[in-house]
């Protein structure tokens, strides 16, 4: 939605990672972890509305711990998946953000809520890098 909205308003739109890069994270996973991810995605389609509804409610209340609990619960059974989908991507994104902060001009960055909560989140990594991070309502 943001991509379409910004594009129609003539705003420059970029990405933190390409679709090819996203798929490469999955490709690096062991075959059993890939299979588990696909099976989980198929099973979870029934509960997606309540899952994302809960995430949205947590985020709108500023309940970062609630988001982290939900995300950690989903990925706790697969450390490989957690590393590939969250830790490595968050580390890459926080490095990109730090480099971008050294350049002039404003930039808006949008990522999924699960990347902004908990241990190894983008926000935590930026704070560790000395940035003051605060949630805006």
Image (tube, rainbow, N blue to C red):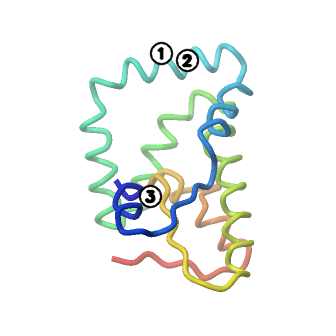
| Residue located beneath label 1 in the image | 39
- Could you say which quadrant of the image residue 6 lies in? bottom left
Separation of disc 2 and disc 3 at Cα?
26 Å
Where 90 falls versus 44 (above or below)?
below
Residue plotted at (31% across, 39% down) = 51
For marks 3 and 1 on the same chain, the one whose residue lies earlier in the sequence: 1
Q: Classify mark 2: helix, strand or loop.
A: helix
Q: Classify mark 3: helix, strand or loop.
A: helix
* Labels 3 and 1 touching (C-beta < 8 A): no
Please name which of the two marks, 2 or 3, marks the residue nearer to the observer: 2
The label shown at residue 36 is 2
> Total marks drawn?
3
Residue plotted at (42% across, 44% down) = 70
* Labels 2 and 3 touching (C-beta < 8 A): no
* Labels 1 and 2 touching (C-beta < 8 A): yes
> What percent of the width, then of the height, locates residue 76?
56, 34
For marks 2 and 3 on the same chain, the one whose residue lies earlier in the sequence: 2
- Could you say which quadrant of the image residue 57 lies in? bottom left
Where 71 falls versus 1 (above or below)?
above
Q: Is residue 40 left or right of residue 18?
A: left
Where 40 falls versus 95 (above or below)?
above
Q: Nearer the viewer, residue 27 or 66?
A: 27
The label shown at residue 65 is 3
- Spot the residue most to the bottom: 104
Q: Nearer the viewer, residue 85 or 23?
A: 23
């Amino acid at each position: 939605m943001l991509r379409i909205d910004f594009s129609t308003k003539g705003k420059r739109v970029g990405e933190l990672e390409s679709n090819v890069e996203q798929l490469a994270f999955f490709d690096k996973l062991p075959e059993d972890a890939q299979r588990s991810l696909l099976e989980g995605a198929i099973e979870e389609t029934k509960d997606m509305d309540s899952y994302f509804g809960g995430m949205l409610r947590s985020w709108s209340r500023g309940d970062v711990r609630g988001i982290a609990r939900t995300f950690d619960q989903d990925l706790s059974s697969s450390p490989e998946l957690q590393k590939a989908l969250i830790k490595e991507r968050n580390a890459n994104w926080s490095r990109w953000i730090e480099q971008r902060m050294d350049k002039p001009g404003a930039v808006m960055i949008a990522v999924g809520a699960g990347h902004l909560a908990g241990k190894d989140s983008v926000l935590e990594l930026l704070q560790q890098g000395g940035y003051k991070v605060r949630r805006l309502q």
